[in-house]
Image: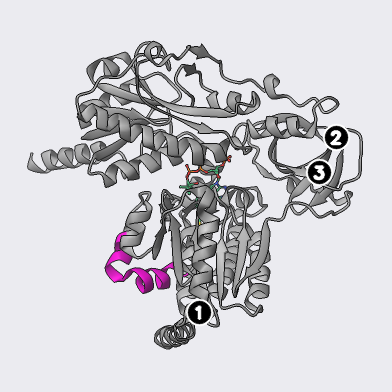
Amino acid sequence: MRILFLCHSFNSLSQRLFVELGERGHEISVEFDINDAVAVEAVELFSPDIIVAPFLKRAIPQSIWESRICLVVHPGPAGDGGPSALDWAILNGQTEWGVTVLQAESGLDAGPVWAHRRFVMRDAPKSSLYRHEVTEAATQAVLEAIDRITQGAKPVSMQSLGAVPIWRDGMKQHSRAIDWARDDTETVLRKIASADGMPGVRDEMFGHEVYLFNAHSAKDLPESEPGAAIARSGGAIARATRDGAVWIGHVRKAGPKTIKLPATQVFAAEARNLPEMPGLDEIRYEEADAVGFLDFRFYNGAMGTETCQQLLAAWHEAVARPTRLIVLSGGPDHWSNGLNLNMIEAADSPADESWANINAMDDLAEAIIRTTGKIVVSAVGGNAGAGGVFLARAADAVWLRQGVILNPHYKDMGNLYGSEFWTYLLPRHAGADNAMRIAAARLPMGAREALSLGLADRIVEAGWAEFDETVRDMAISLANCPDIQSRLDEKARRRAADEAVKPLADYRAEELGRLRRNFYGFDPSYHVARHNFVYKVAKSRTPITIARHRATAQMMQARRKAAS
Ligand code: COA
């Protein structure tokens, strides 16, 4: 089928559906919901069989839904309606929730149902629920809906499903405002979870209006007046609640032109007066049966300069241990998304900070590549983008959870050249042809394609909840296999041979030479793209890489011009 995605942005769910439907042979093109006229034009140009709206904030124009089937993904069970479905579900403490694929009609979220799924709610931030439970349920439901359409089936009415329509308006800040004197720790956490990663809970800290993100319960901290800042740990600041305390990891000051950053960076002077206490462990290490598990979970997968340095220090400690294998486990939501673009944007000199950050990232990647005494596995259970993908590839083996989406490209960030030794790692693991194909593309990639291209070595057929356990068993069995020593010998031989052909230092110098131009040169594209990304500036048109109908139209226009 020819399927047009109409979406607010090409977000993680849209990318997952793009990959899944593409793998099933459907022809997909994407148009951002910029205005009705653009949407109508996209339908005329692509002439799709059906339209899918995985993530849409406005109604589909009537002329479109009258002309073909439009499937709308709603992150709520049948009957639920409104733009803050998941926010309300978390805030109201729902124990079960769902996803419904409706046919667009005149009423928002009110059309007949093509497919739906339910899932058990988890105690997690909204963005995490969206990336796992909602995305899995939505993927299954969209696939089922398309199967049913192909078979000539009809959608069913809400009534026949026994669903009672309930409309909930977009959630306003007052609905989740924290009353520090009254709310217990669990309520504070639930309110912040309902708003994470966007828009955050509006509150006050040190006399400033702020939005709070990335909250966790805090243990063993001194009691204080509810709401008071009582300690710091890494980037987080702890605040007392009436029955305990919470760590606030990230904060954005209210007002225009503000950036979500670690709380101790936003309130650097105030944080200096707080006692440093053990808090969130973003980096953890444990061992079992000759395997070291180096686990890192950075908010949004962003790895700033200091973060890379801390992970490198942990890496050196892990390497010094008497193990045969190290597993690099990134977070379940994002394995890594490369440089921390928010911190770069907030720096006095974004160019200098970009340079420091990429060097710290390269130090880490280089240390991983140069480790010959152990087999290294990247266990990628969460999505990865840009430099994060190549950091994973620095390991000997990349094990991908099924359903993970990779974005192995830098170009969308203002034609950034990228580093992390990608010019060495891609040909080495994927071969020259695939390396060129990967480097030229700008599209999201699923686990199967990554495996076929050599970006990954194994797909782990486990749900995200079982992924860590499955990886653990796989790693222990690999570390204890009889030929482990010959694998290690072969690894050392191969590294030495590669080094003799072209030293890693040369790859690094060449990549950084190109990046220096991106950071300090005349062309400001990277700085502009980063600024737009960090401030979430809405795109004024859909990139031609995904708006394939526009690429075709452009080509035809050029041909007509050439012919005349
Ligand atoms: N630095 C800082 N924040 C980042 C980030 C990065 N490198 N990558 C992602 N984020 C943040 C996003 O701003 C967003 O923030 P929010 O919590 O305020 O909403 C959150 O992580 C989720 O990212 P989002 O873009 O919504 O996820 P996605 O699944 O739709 O897209 C990517 C995934 C990887 C394609 C996209 O995040 C991206 O392009 N990231 C930048 C990658 C990059 O160029 N890195 C620098 C070069 S190494």
Taking the spot 63% from the left edge, 31% from the top edge, the residue there is: 195
Q: Is residue 146 visible?
A: yes
Q: Quadrant of the N terminus?
A: top left
Question: In the rendered structure, are the residues bearing label 2 and label 3 in contact, judged by CB atoms less than 8 Å apart?
Answer: no
Q: What kind of residue is marked 3?
A: Ala
Looking at the rendered structure, the number of numbered marks drawn on it comes to 3
Q: Quadrant of the C terminus?
A: top left
Q: SS at mark 2?
A: loop
> What segment carries the magenta color?
421-437
Q: Main secondary structure of the magenta part?
A: helix
Q: Which residue is mark 1?
A: 505
Q: Nearer the viewer, mark 1 or mark 2?
A: 2
Q: SS at mark 3?
A: strand
Q: Is residue 521 visible?
A: no
Q: What kind of residue is marked 1?
A: Ala
Between the C-alphas of marks 2 and 3, the distance is 13 Å
Question: In the rendered structure, are the residues bearing label 1 and label 2 in contact, judged by CB atoms less than 8 Å apart?
Answer: no
Q: Nearer the viewer, mark 3 or mark 1?
A: 3
Whether label 2 lies within 8 Å of ligand 1 gets the answer: no
Q: Position of residue 75 (x, y in %)?
A: 48, 28
Going from N to C along the chain, the mark reached first, 2 or 3, is 3
Residue extending furthest toward the left: 563
Question: In the rendered structure, are the residues bearing label 3 and label 1 in contact, judged by CB atoms less than 8 Å apart?
Answer: no
Residue placed most toward the observer, 383 or 559: 383
Going from N to C along the chain, the mark reached first, 3 or 1, is 3
Q: What kind of residue is marked 2?
A: Asp
Residue 519 covered by magenta stretch: no
Q: Which residue is mark 2?
A: 243
Mark 3 nearby-residue class (10 Å; few <14, some 14–19, many ≥20)? many
Taking the spot 63% from the left edge, 71% from the top edge, the residue there is: 315
Q: Which residue is mark 3?
A: 238
Q: Quadrant of residue 540?
A: top left
